Image (spheres, helix red, strand yellow):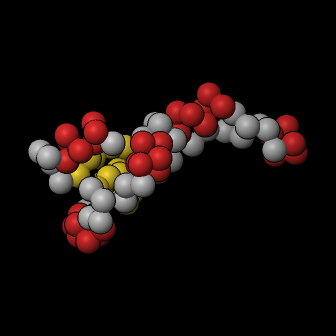
Amino acid sequence: MQIHNKIFAKADVIVTPTTGMTAYSITKNALKTGELDYVNGGTIIRYQIAGNFLGLPAITVPVGYDKAGLPIGLQFIGKPWSEPTLMHLAFAM
């Protein structure tokens, strides 16, 4: 939290991609057994972990598509109790 507080002393929000990659293919075996892909799973949640553990508010907005047509999102992470600021940013996007 100390690192994030230093950032928030200079900025109102932290801007990151929503995920570390676009969606990956799910194998047929995974559909049957509920298999988890830890490598891709870790990459996908890379930018949400700190905010989730620290209880920071965040919002994500769609900003486009990759070459395969999969959606790409932009995430805004705010200071504690900054939900109104995040809502205004998302609306402006």
46 relative to 80 in the view: left or right = right
Name, please, the residue furthest toward the left: 10
Q: Position of residue 49 (x, y in %)?
A: 47, 42
User: Dividing the image into 4 quarters, which one contains the C terminus?
Assistant: bottom left
Figure label count: 0
**Measuring 37% from the left and 59% from the top, which residue is drawn there?**
57
**Measuring 73% from the left and 37% from the top, which residue is drawn there?**
36
Question: Where on the picture, by quarter, is residue 7?
Answer: top left
**Measuring 62% from the left and 28% from the top, which residue is drawn there?**
39
**Measuring 32% from the left and 52% from the top, which residue is drawn there?**
77
Task: Residue 52: tell me if it is visible.
Answer: yes
Q: Position of residue 64 (x, y in %)?
A: 37, 51
45 relative to 74 in the view: left or right = right
In the foreground, 63 or 51: 51
Q: Would you place residue 67 above or below residue 57 in this image?
A: above
Name, please, the residue furthest toward the front: 2
61 relative to 48 in the view: left or right = left
Task: Residue 72: tell me if it is visible.
Answer: no
Name, please, the residue furthest toward the right: 32
